[in-house]
């Protein structure tokens, strides 16, 4: 029987889950158990207990989430069930089993009216259903398992899954010009960097429960982000800056969602990576993947 510590990863086919899968072989001291939505729907509480009883994980990283920000406005109940109630149950089951619980949350718990980076104890005030459901998950996790760690992050992208970077590349290949919002600012997060940070937290010699903020370093708008994607992928498409009011969406977005990362740096010795450097790493990976599959990312 293996004596390695087990890490159970829920929602393992999402962006963060896939990045953890990519990293797993570099951490042979752990035995990873990756469970997708199909393997373990976290809102099936009986099944959650069955898995915990049989796997007996030392750590659980919850990558499962309802992340369809606009759709959440019309699927409020489902969003709260997955991002709220199910997170509370996971946290409680972790406590019962002595499993250290790491949960991931969002910059969207804030209202975006600040003018300087949000610290962890800044008052929350979500402006959309997704943010409210994620805040409910944070509250339930902290209440039912105060020993848990919650990492709030923002603007997540990866070579896996659906995200802004991949959508931009596709649109830049298809169109002569596109319009991108220039009055919402924040910090992108390469999911591979976040995955590394989470494993570093687990490997840190002491467990420090609480809420932490993590993203890549730098403050930009979605328009700036699109421009950098265009430059790095050498696309020819014209990018036009527009305002949020010119691009109405079902869910409101916070105008300013920059997270202050001082606490995670000081507690776990995390070094922040520059957003542009991480974007270049992701685009290189996408290029390698598309070259091997015969699809061109770089026009
Ligand atoms: N993406 C962002 O920009 C962003 C920003 C800030 C914070 N976050 C947070 O970061 C974390 C990771 O996000 P991500 O970008 O990796 O999200 P993602 O790519 O959408 O992955 C979430 C995964 O959870 C799965 N899932 C949905 N409902 C589930 C359920 N009931 N049981 C089990 N799995 C379920 C999804 O499956 P299906 O796809 O099949 O539904 C998907 O594979 C989440 O907590 C998210 O809220 C994300």
Image (tube, rainbow, N blue to C red):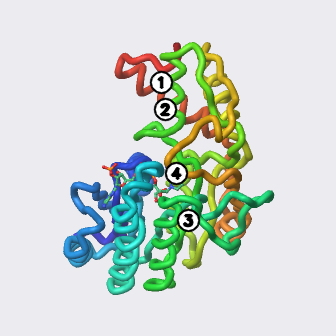
The residue located at (24%, 62%) in the rendering is 40
Label 4 vs 3, first from the N-terminus? 3
Residue 98 position within the rendered picture, expressed as x and y whole percent measured from the top left: 37, 84
Mark 1 crowd level (few <14, some 14–19, many ≥20, 10 Å Cα): few
Residue 83 position within the rendered picture, expressed as x and y whole percent measured from the top left: 41, 65
Which residue in the protein does label 4 denote?
Answer: 251
The answer to whether 240 is drawn above or below residue 249 in the figure is above
Which residue in the protein does label 3 denote?
Answer: 151
Mark 4 crowd level (few <14, some 14–19, many ≥20, 10 Å Cα): some
The answer to whether 26 is drawn above or below residue 31 in the figure is above
Residue 167 vs residue 254, the one in the foreground: 254
Q: Gap in Å between the C-alphas at discs 3 and 1?
A: 30 Å
Q: Quadrant of the N terminus?
A: bottom left
Which residue in the protein does label 1 denote?
Answer: 170
SS label for mark 1: helix
Give yes or no for contact between labels 4 and 2 (Cβ–Cβ under 8 Å).
Answer: no
Find out if the beta carbon at label 2 lies less than 8 Å from the nearest ligand 1 atom.
no
SS label for mark 4: loop
Which residue in the protein does label 2 denote?
Answer: 166
């Amino acid at each position: 029987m293996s004596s390695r510590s087990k890490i159970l990863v829920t929602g393992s086919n999402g962006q963060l889950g896939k990045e953890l899968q990519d990293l797993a072989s570099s951490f042979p001291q752990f035995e990873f158990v990756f469970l997708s939505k199909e393997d373990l729907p976290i809102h099936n509480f009986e099944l959650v207990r069955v898995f915990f009883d049989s796997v007996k994980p030392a750590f659980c990283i919850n990558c499962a989430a309802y992340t369809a920000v606009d759709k959440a406005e019309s699927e409020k109940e489902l969003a709260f069930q997955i991002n709220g109630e199910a997170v509370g149950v996971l946290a409680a089951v972790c406590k019962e089993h002595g499993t250290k619980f790491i949960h991931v949350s969002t910059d969207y718990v804030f209202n975006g009216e600040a003018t300087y980076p949000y610290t962890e104890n800044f008052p929350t005030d979500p402006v959309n259903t997704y943010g409210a459901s994620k805040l409910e998950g944070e509250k339930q996790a902290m209440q039912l398992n105060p020993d848990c760690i919650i990492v709030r992050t923002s603007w997540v992208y990866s070579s896996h899954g659906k995200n802004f970077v991949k959508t931009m590349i596709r649109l830049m290949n298809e169109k002569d010009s596109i319009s991108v919002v220039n009055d919402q600012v924040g910090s992108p997060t390469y999911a591979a960097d976040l995955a590394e940070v989470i494993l570093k937290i687990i490997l840190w010699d002491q467990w420090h429960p609480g809420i932490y903020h993590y993203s890549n370093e730098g403050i930009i708008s979605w328009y700036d982000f699109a421009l950098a994607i265009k430059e790095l992928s050498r696309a020819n498409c014209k990018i036009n800056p527009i305002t949020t009011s010119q691009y109405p969406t079902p869910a409101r977005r916070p105008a300013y969602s920059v997270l202050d990362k001082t606490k995670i740096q000081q507690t776990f010795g995390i070094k922040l990576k520059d957003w542009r450097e991480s974007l270049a790493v992701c685009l290189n990976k996408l290029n390698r993947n598309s070259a091997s599959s015969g699809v061109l990312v770089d026009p």
